[in-house]
Image (cartoon, rainbow, N blue to C red):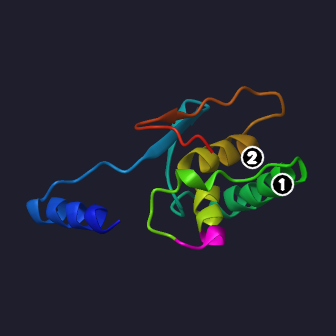
Amino acid sequence: WEQVHKLRKTMWERGTRKPPGCSSIELDGVVHEFIVGDITHSRKKEIYEMLDEMGKRLKLAGYEADTKQVLLDIDEEEVKQNSLGHHSEKLAVAFGFISSRPGTTIRVIKNLRVCSD
């Protein structure tokens, strides 16, 4: 992690910027884009309520977060799990659930890689 911090500092000093990972979903001809922990959407309250519901249902079904996907210097397992819970993919899916009828296909598009969690 020390070398990661050093590299990020060097990139910052040189003005090198990495585009943030984002997920997009199109509904009714409008593209909605989300980044990790996004709170800018006009329906953020509903989205996060759906995220909570999704988390509860997944846990009841036996789901456990794959915290190996957390590419941050975090030691606490609970913090890692919360980080995964607010990934852009999950925000986009939650928005799809609250914005469409049951049975509707939801397609999420990524600009970088998809978190395997």
Which residues are drawn in magenta?
75-79
Q: Which residue is mark 2?
A: 98
Disc nearer the start of the sequence (1/2):
1
Q: Which residue is mark 1?
A: 59
Viewport quadrant of the C terminus:
top right
Residue 44, x across and y down, in percent = 62, 61
Helix, strand or loop under label 2: helix
Q: Can you name the residue that lies furthest to the right here?
A: 60
Q: Residues within 10 Å of mark 1 (few under 14, many from 20)?
A: few
Residue 11, x across and y down, in percent = 17, 59
- At label 2, the amino acid type is Ile
Label 1 or label 2, whichever lies nearer to me, is 1
Helix, strand or loop under label 1: helix
Q: How many marks?
A: 2
Which residue sits at x=13%, y=59%?
A: 15
Q: Can you name the residue that lies furthest to the left here?
A: 14
Viewport quadrant of the N terminus:
bottom left
Quarter-of-image position of residue 103: top right
Residue 77, x across and y down, in percent = 63, 68
